[in-house]
């Protein structure tokens, strides 16, 4: 079973009647899903899609999403999930960048399709899920009209299986090419740690355009278990879905965990079936983590750190380190230890020379989960991925003497003030401990004297003088690290995974000026 499409074939053969996916009130067995993937493959082939071609999908989580993923792979093509929160022009950029021949669109996004249809340079066919009377080709009718025959193409494990686009928080998103081999490496190592078996029920709550949602949607096939597809990451729907389907494993981002604690309906749901809750993709405050552990007292918690370019998680903070009152509480601030198949180093960003334990630098990793490369960007690939498969994450942190990874920031978010390197996450952690601060972001803003200085943007639950917040930081941090100014905001802009859009916050302050780290 060297490729994921053959894994599906094997699952369908060995237990055809077992449920593969649950989406709303729809359940589909492995046998039916296997046949459905063949029909999608035939429909794509009929549209001229073949080896190496791209098929774009713009939709919220759906059964069709998974069908296109496996159907495309069966003809050697590659699914390109598109972030449904993007503006129409941003969607057009990704579809064109991928040179997608076919574009599959969810019912809510027909207006986006119509806004960009004349801008799509390579797309010969667009189909709409539940097209109704929109006048567009209906996805189900298109697939049902195709023959239920097995494709002749035999994929290789080194073939690209999916092309996910990076979040683009620091520029144009890049197409990250992940292979069958990458997925096998990621799923094999996590299965042992997550203690997944055929009786597990997995919820796919993160968007399937995100690496976490995508890998989890494949995990259901890889493991031969039921996957519950949550249409969108709505806290109440997630809680009710856990109760209804007796979900045992889920991945959530910290901002969702925070929201779940604020919604009464979530607290009323029976989530006692949940064995393991994985969280990651953005920093978590100790208060949010403690609250989540109180909300789910019988559930084990595990933090993971990873990136799209490394097929998801490459470190994990195990359940035994999640004791807020134990002897190693400092480890709750870490991202855990490397996966069994991963080597980590901390290097000087300028020289790439390894630095000692405890010293902050750029995180680099060597793992079979490392991407094949960036689509159409050989120079960017060569810059990020060395010949001996060390990947530059662009993240900053350090390893302690026990091998635990502690995160600081993105290299591009680092503030250089008077020659001193300042990591916004360190300041943000302090700010979040202030009783009146409910959310915050720290950015570098221009300074004639220092080049740039930290500025705190804060969401407050009550009025607090600017100087009080600065003084609060000065009691806990070196003065050069502390904000030189504080500005109150109604909200902090984030992408769907909870990452702060630092570039969006910085740009107005740097208009017309150069910034060394951008």
Image: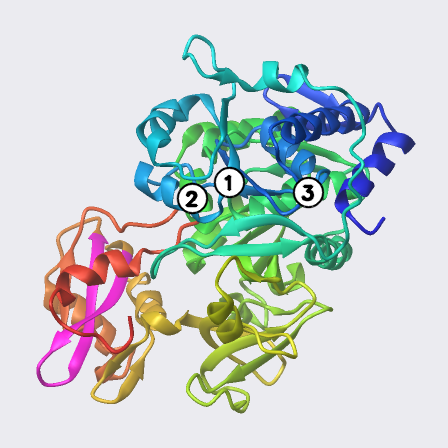
Q: Residue furthest right?
A: 14
- Whether the residues at callouts 2 and 1 have beta carbons within 8 Å, the answer is yes
- Foreground tag (1 vs 3): 1
Q: What type of secondary structure mainly makes up the magenta span?
A: strand
Residue 261 visible here: yes
User: Dot 2 lies on which element?
Assistant: helix
Cα separation, mark 2 vs mark 1, equals 6 Å
Residue matched to label 1? 100
Q: Does the magenta stretch include residue 169?
A: no
- Whether the residues at callouts 1 and 3 have beta carbons within 8 Å, the answer is no
- Image location (x, y in percent) of residue 132: 47, 10
Relative to residue 290, is residue 517 drawn left or right? left
**Residue at figure coordinates x 71%, y 24% from the top left:** 39
Residue matched to label 3? 218
Between 461 and 20, the residue placed more toward the observer is 20
- Image location (x, y in percent) of residue 75: 71, 38
Residue 264 sits in quarter? top left
Cα separation, mark 2 vs mark 3, equals 26 Å
- Foreground tag (2 vs 3): 2
Q: How crowded is mark 3: few (under 14 residues within 10 Å), some or many (20 or more)?
A: many
Q: Is residue 53 above or below residue 434?
A: above
Cα separation, mark 1 vs mark 3, equals 22 Å
Residue matched to label 2? 96
**What are the residue bounds of the magenta stretch?**
440-459
């Amino acid at each position: 079973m060297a490729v994921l499409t053959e894994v599906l074939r094997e699952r369908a053969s060995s237990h055809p009647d077992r449920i593969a996916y649950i989406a709303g009130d729809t359940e589909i067995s492995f046998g039916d899903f296997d046949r459905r993937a063949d029909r999608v493959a035939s429909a794509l082939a009929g549209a001229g899609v073949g080896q190496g071609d791209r098929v774009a999908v713009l939709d919220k989580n759906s059964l069709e999403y998974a069908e296109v993923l496996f159907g495309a792979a069966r003809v050697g093509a590659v699914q390109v999930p598109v972030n449904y929160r993007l503006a129409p022009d941003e969607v057009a950029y990704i579809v064109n960048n991928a040179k997608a021949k076919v574009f599959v669109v969810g019912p809510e996004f027909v207006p986006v399709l119509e806004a960009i249809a004349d801008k799509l340079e390579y797309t010969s066919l667009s189909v709409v899920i539940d097209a109704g009377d929109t006048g567009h080709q209906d996805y189900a009718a298109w697939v049902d009209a195709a023959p239920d025959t097995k494709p002749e193409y035999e994929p290789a494990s080194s073939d690209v299986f999916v092309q996910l686009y990076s979040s683009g928080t620091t520029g144009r998103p890049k197409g990250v090419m992940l292979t069958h081999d990458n997925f096998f490496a990621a799923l094999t190592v996590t299965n042992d740690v997550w203690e997944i078996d055929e009786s597990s029920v997995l919820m796919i709550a993160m968007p399937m355009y995100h690496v976490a949602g995508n890998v989890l949607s494949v995990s259901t096939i890889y493991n031969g278990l039921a996957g519950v597809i949550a249409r969108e990451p709505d806290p109440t729907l997630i809680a009710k879905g856990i109760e209804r389907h007796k979900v045992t494993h889920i991945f959530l981002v910290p901002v969702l965990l925070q929201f779940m604690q604020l919604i009464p309906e979530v607290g009323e749901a029976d989530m006692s079936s949940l064995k393991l809750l994985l969280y990651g993709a953005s920093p978590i405050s100790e208060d949010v983590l403690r609250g989540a552990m109180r909300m789910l007292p019988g559930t084990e918690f595990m933090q993971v750190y990873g990136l799209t370019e490394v097929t998801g998680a490459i470190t994990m903070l195990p359940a035994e380190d999640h004791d807020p009152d134990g002897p190693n509480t400092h480890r709750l601030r870490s991202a855990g230890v490397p996966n069994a198949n991963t080597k980590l180093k901390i290097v000087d960003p300028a020289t790439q020379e390894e630095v000692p334990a405890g010293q902050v630098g750029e995180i680099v990793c060597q793992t079979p989960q490392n991407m094949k490369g960036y689509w159409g960007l050989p120079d960017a690939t060569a810059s990020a991925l060395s010949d001996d498969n060390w990947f530059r994450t662009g993240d900053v942190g350090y390893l302690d003497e026990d091998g635990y990874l502690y995160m600081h920031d993105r290299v591009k978010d680092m503030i250089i003030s008077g020659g001193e390197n300042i990591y916004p996450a360190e300041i943000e952690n302090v700010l979040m401990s202030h009783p009146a601060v409910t959310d915050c972001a720290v950015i570098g803003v221009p300074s004639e004297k220092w080049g740039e200085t930290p500025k705190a943007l804060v969401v407050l639950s009550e009025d607090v003088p600017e100087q009080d917040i600065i003084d609060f930081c000065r009691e806990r941090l070196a003065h050069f690290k502390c904000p030189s100014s504080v500005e109150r905001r109604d909200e902090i802009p984030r992408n769907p995974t909870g990452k702060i859009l630092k570039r969006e916050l910085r740009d107005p302050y740097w208009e017309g000026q150069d910034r060394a780290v951008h």
